[in-house]
Image (cartoon, rainbow, N blue to C red):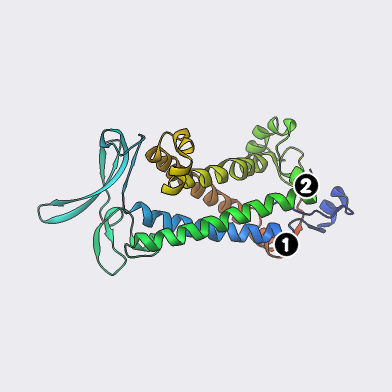
């Protein structure tokens, strides 16, 4: 999903016709890609560990059961423990998956998310916070280094949406749906890729970082106005969780596209930087 150096000496038409390679992703772009991929995995797992300590989300400035949008609970049903996921007051049985599930130590207990999905596995709020803080910094530094590098090298323009890109969004979607035989003309990234990457890089990443900061008591004390912008700490916690779910959905879709559009070519480009242009691939803005 990164943008970086593209070899200018090779004409796009010639590259398409001969299957020549272009140097698409530079060292910093590739490093940032793998760092934030690892960081997001660890952040999700450690974040779920932290969430287990208070397994609910409220649409409120403070904890308020009357405005609870999501909760996980365990109840005793005739001597048998049962787990529930509660969405807007509607309880859904999720025993062995959520609510009452793997405790990370070979048994089951009352906890929102199972041990195999959290870091660490057993309930440990302090260590979960340490993992989360360290990899939050890793994500921020990778994101910042990527944007600065792309701006300095002049390749950020390949990624930024332009007015003409918006007219190509629907034709590109029709191409993905196999309704259209060819995609609309595009450069290094097609219009749907550009839109998605713009939302992730310039929207979701910054909002994840900022909402995460508002959950820090020190930041809340020093910058109370920042917490107020998001409706209070509980609301900020809800936004942070929703953004995490959306980001996981994005990466799931991203992996599907990597697998279906040439797995080895895509992986090679993110390991070595070199990408082999296909019939409908572009090599510039």
Q: Circle 2: is it few (<14), some (14-19), or many (20+) Cα within 10 Å?
A: some
Identify the mark nearer the N-term, 2 or 1: 1
Q: Secondary structure at mark 2?
A: loop
Q: Quadrant of residue 10?
A: bottom right
Viewer-nearest residue: 158 or 50: 50
Q: Please name the residue shown 26% across and 33% down the image.
A: 66
- Residue lying at 23% horizontally and 60% vertically, measured from the top left: 109
Depth check: 43 or 79 in front?
43
Vertical comparison of 233 with 12: above or below: above
How many tags in the picture?
2
Residue at screen point 73% across, 57% down: 25
Percent position of residue 91, x then y: 25, 41
Measured Cα–Cα span from mark 2 to mark 1: 21 Å
Where, quadrant-wise, is the C terminus in this rendering?
Answer: top right
Mark 1 crowdedness (10 Å alpha carbons): few <14, some 14-19, many ≥20: some
SS class, disc 1: helix
In the rendered structure, the answer to whether residue 274 lies left or right of residue 192 reads right
Residue 266 in the image: x percent, y percent?
A: 67, 58
| In this view, the mark in front (2 or 1) | 1
Q: Position of residue 30 (x, y in %)?
A: 68, 60
The residue sitting at the bottom extreme is 106
Q: Is residue 61 visible?
A: yes
Farthest residue toward the front? 222
Mark 1 = which residue? 27
| Residue 1 seen by the camera | no
Q: Which residue is mark 2?
A: 282
Pinpoint residue 20: horizontal percent, then vertical percent. Answer: 82, 58
């Amino acid at each position: 999903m990164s943008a970086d150096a593209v070899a200018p000496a090779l004409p796009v038409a010639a590259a398409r016709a001969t299957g020549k390679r272009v140097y698409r992703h530079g060292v910093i772009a590739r490093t940032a890609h793998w760092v934030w991929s690892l960081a997001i995995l660890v952040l999700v797992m450690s974040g779920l560990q932290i969430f287990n300590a208070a397994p609910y989300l409220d649409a409120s400035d403070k904890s308020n059961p009357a405005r609870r949008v999501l909760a996980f609970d365990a109840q005793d049903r005739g001597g048998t423990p049962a787990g529930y996921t509660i969405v807007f007051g509607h309880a859904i049985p999720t025993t062995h998956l959520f609510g009452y599930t793997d405790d990370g130590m070979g048994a089951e207990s009352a906890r929102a998310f199972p041990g195999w999905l959290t870091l660490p596995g057993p309930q440990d709020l302090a260590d979960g916070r340490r993992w989360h803080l360290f990899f939050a910094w890793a994500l921020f530094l990778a994101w910042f280094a990527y944007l600065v590098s792309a701006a300095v090298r002049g390749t950020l323009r390949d990624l930024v949406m332009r007015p003409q890109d918006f007219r190509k969004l629907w034709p590109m979607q029709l191409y993905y749906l196999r309704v259209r035989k060819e995609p609309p003309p595009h450069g290094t990234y097609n219009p749907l890729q550009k839109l998605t990457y713009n939302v992730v890089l310039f929207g979701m990443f910054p909002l994840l970082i900022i909402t995460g900061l508002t959950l820090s008591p020190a930041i809340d004390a020093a910058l109370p106005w920042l917490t107020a912008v998001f409706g209070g700490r509980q609301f900020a916690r809800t936004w942070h969780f929703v953004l995490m779910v959306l980001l996981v959905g994005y990466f799931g879709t991203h992996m599907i596209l990597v697998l279906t559009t040439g797995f080895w070519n895509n992986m090679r480009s993110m390991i070595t930087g070199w990408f082999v242009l296909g019939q409908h691939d572009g090599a510039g803005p």
